[in-house]
Amino acid sequence: MRRILLISAFFSLFLLIVSGPAAGAATELKLGVVTKPGSAQNIVAGKFKDLLEKRAPGRYTVKIFHSKSIGNETEILQQIQMNTIQLGVITGGPFDTFDPIVRVINYPFLFKNYEQVDQVLDGPIGQAILKELEKVGFKGLAFSENGFRNLTNNRRPVKSAADVKGLKIRVMASALHKAIWQALGANPTPMPWPIYTELEQGVIDGEENPLWVMQVYKFYEIQKYMTMTRHVYSPHIDVASLNWWQGLPPADRKLIRACMVEAARFQRTDNRAKNAARLKFLKEKGMVVEEHPDIASFRKKVAGLKNNELFADPKVHDLLEKALAATR
Ligand code: EAX
């Protein structure tokens, strides 16, 4: 009897080993975003979760880690490289420390409108950037949207680049963003997200972000002046861990990529549709908005950046020239 029990115990163990986890158990994918619910990144993440869970019922679930619960954007990217989390929706800026190729799409005043954005990001230039990210451990899936960035500050109305002089401006962890604000005469301070407390306490005079940020993060409470500089268009780069990706069956790769591309398209449309209402809201809250600053004065100060050492790598420089030609 004991022997039979022992044999059956071994047999069960054997079955468990060969068959893996109980059939039907869904694989949980971890997805990181730094911002809080309601933010642009979370809208992409939520849509992706809905789509994938619907199209692969019982096979995948997506757990969204938000509000810096697993670290800032740089730290989320490091965890994706290590495959401790599988996916992320991360602003273009912080990719700068991982691969200089992203400077191409973060270049100041590159995009004049959304048509150019979509054409470049969804075309060969965007695809070349997603592909290049494989060298640093990311599988680039899609571009969603943070948006055109605008300057806010608490010192003075900014109407032209000359007014920027000496302002202490928080920038993302990006050598290019720092160089932009240096060229503009500001005193740029790299700082990870979020930055409400630093603005409130006056550690920094201002910051720059798309309109949704000023609303969702209530910057109208602590920033008096906004200037619609639209100096950089920030995409999010929606990435997976390359390490994890390479172990996936091809059909799953196809499905996951399709869900992210669709989530990104959905969110870009959603984001753009809301901008007029956001601007109205911020004015109603008392922000003093300069809607038509002297953009030429800003452009002039950053015009030399393409010859900066940040673009010294021939591959980066060539792709920037292509992007500039495509958006002329
Ligand atoms: O979306 O750090 C930043 O300024 C980013 O734009 C942030 O992710 C907010």
Image (tube, grey):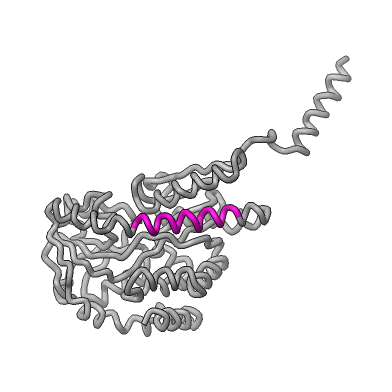
| 260 horizontally vs 26: left or right | left
Give the prevailing secondary structure in the magenta stretch.
helix
Instruction: Find residue 23 and report its image quarter.
Output: top right
Outermost residue on the top side: it is 1
Number of numbered labels in the structure image? 0
Q: Is residue 263 magenta?
A: yes
Q: Position of residue 109 (x, y in %)?
A: 31, 75
- Does residue 201 show up? no
Where residue 56 sits in the image (x, y, percent)?
60, 44
Which residues, given as a range, are shown in magenta?
Answer: 255-271
| Residue 157 figure quarter | bottom left
Q: Quadrant of the N terminus?
A: top right
Residue at image coords 41%, 49%: 71
Q: Residue at x 35, y 76 (%)?
A: 110
Front residue of 284/184: it is 284
Residue drawn at (28%, 71%) of the image? 231
- Residue 61 placed where, x, y %? 55, 41
57 inside magenta stretch: no
Say above or below: 59 vs 143: above
Residue placed at 36% from the left, 53% from the top?
40
Q: Quadrant of the C terminus?
A: bottom left
Of 314 and 227, which appears nearest the observer? Answer: 227
Residue 171 spot, x, y in % from top left:
30, 64
In the rendered image of this protein, does residue 114 appear above or below residue 263? Answer: below
Task: From the viewer's side, name the closer residue of 266 and 132.
Answer: 266
Question: Quadrant location of residue 267?
Answer: bottom left
Residue 52 appears anywhere in the view: yes
